Image (tube, rainbow, N blue to C red):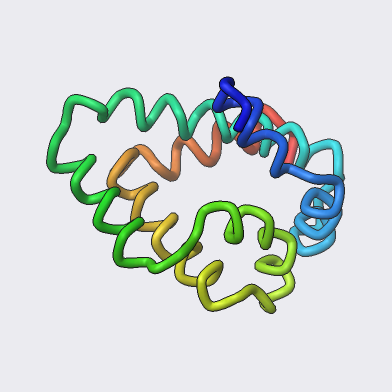
Amino acid sequence: MDENILKSLSDYVTPDLISKASSMLGESESGISQAMNAAIPALLGGLASKADSPDVMDGIMNLVNQGGFDADSVLSDLPSLLSGKGSKSALNALNSGGNMMQMLFGDKQSGMFDALANSAGI
């Protein structure tokens, strides 16, 4: 695995994923790409800001452990999630991801999504 977690996660933002997200959302591929590239550091920043909160970190670990999914298979299955044909593991991860976002960003989640969308022009 690459030692740079930002680079490692960004590698999962493939042209296929961007194309499917663009089609599904009716947005430009460049806008989707910009939003995804901005979302990864925002997510990592959210994790870093909660690193000293045992309740949040325990909650995230519980989501990961209870989801019964393998990160590599879920991340490589992202394009199929957008078509609604993701594996059970990937679909569980999608639900867990929503819960994780709530733990990390709480009532600021909507504002963060709006800021990402605005910065990407979508």
Decide which of 84, 88 is in the foreground and name it. Answer: 88
Identify the residue at horizontal 57%, vertical 33% (top origin).
40
Q: Quadrant of the C terminus?
A: top right
Q: Is residue 62 left or right of residue 82?
A: left
Decide which of 44, 34 is in the foreground and name it. Answer: 44
Identify the residue at horizontal 35%, vertical 56% (top origin).
64
Q: Quadrant of the N terminus?
A: top right
Identify the residue at horizontal 68%, vertical 36% (top origin).
35
- Provide residue 105's location: percent of width, then percent of height: 34, 39
- Provide residue 100's location: percent of width, then percent of height: 35, 50
The outermost residue toward the top is: 4
Relative to 27, is 45 above or below? above
Relative to 114, is 62 above or below? below
Relative to 19, is 45 above or below? above
Relative to 76, is 44 above or below? above
- Provide residue 16's location: percent of width, then percent of height: 85, 54
Q: Is residue 19 left or right of residue 115?
A: right
- Provide residue 93's location: percent of width, then percent of height: 47, 63
The image quadrant that residue 5 belongs to is top right
Q: Is residue 26 left or right of residue 59?
A: right
